Image: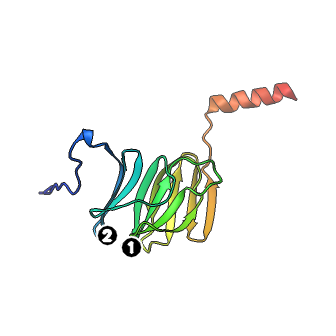
Amino acid sequence: MLRIVTYTFYSIASERSGIRLIDADWSDRCGWIVVQRSRRRLECVVNGTVLHPDVSVRFPIIRWVDSERFLLADARSDGMSHNVFLVDLHGNVQHSFCGGDGIEDIAIGKEGTRVLIIQNYTYAFHKFGHTQTKQRPSRISNREEAAQRKNGEQTK
């Protein structure tokens, strides 16, 4: 029989504390990491240590890269500004790039040098220093396809 073990590794004392938990990640090798807002200020809590990275992030996503670095990303972007930041355990940004708009999730490769960014209609693969973006195939229903053909025939 499978035994489920629960453990609270981070808690916020009160809703009145002004702290809002936004995202978290856990790794057996690295421990836990949390991104939260404390009185409108962004904080990253790494195994109990509070960091204040000097980045502007409105909709944060946080993921471990390895035991000494993590990714902090803003899910929304204008499509040109850098919104994915590689941060060390002192809160210093080591590298950044544009991950695009509408980031849904981020997956990190085992060796920590490859990042897969999952978005609504695209996915971007980033190996630090090089980015490739591909469109997901669009799914058009038969009804929409027929309407497009009909409209195309009428305008010719």
In-front residue for pair 104/77: 77
User: Which part of the image, by quadrant, shows the C terminus?
Assistant: top right
| In front of the other: 69 or 112 | 69
Task: Report the number of discs.
Answer: 2
Horizontal and vertical percent for residue 38? 35, 48
Q: Nearer the N terminus, badge 2 or badge 1?
A: 2
Instruction: Check if mark 2's residue and mark 1's residue have beta carbons within 8 Å.
Output: no
Residue 53, how many percent across, how many down?
A: 45, 61
Q: Residue at x 42, y 71 (%)?
A: 110
Q: Amino acid at mark 1?
A: Glu
> In this view, which residue lies farthest toward the top?
154
- Residue, far right: 156
Name which residue type carries label 2. Cys
Horizontal side, residue 56 vs residue 24: left or right: right
Number of residues whose C-alpha sits closer than 10 Å to that of mark 1, classed few (under 14), some (14–19) or many (20 or more): few
- The residue under label 1 is 68
Numbered disc in front, either 2 or 1: 1
Question: Relative to 151, does residue 77 appear above or below in the rendering?
Answer: below
Residue 28, label in figure? none
Q: Quadrant of residue 46?
A: bottom left
Circle 2 Cα neighbour tier, 10 Å, few/some/many (<14 / 14–19 / ≥20): some
Estimate the spatial distance between the alpha carbons at disc 2 and disc 1, rounded to whole Å. Answer: 8 Å
Residue in the foreground of this view, choosing between 20 and 151: 20
Name the secondary structure under disc 1: loop
Q: Residue at x 53, y 59 (%)?
A: 84
Q: Residue 124, image x and y in percent?
A: 57, 58
Label 2 element class: loop
Q: What is the quadrant of the N terminus in the image? A: bottom left
**According to the image, label 2 marks what residue?**
30
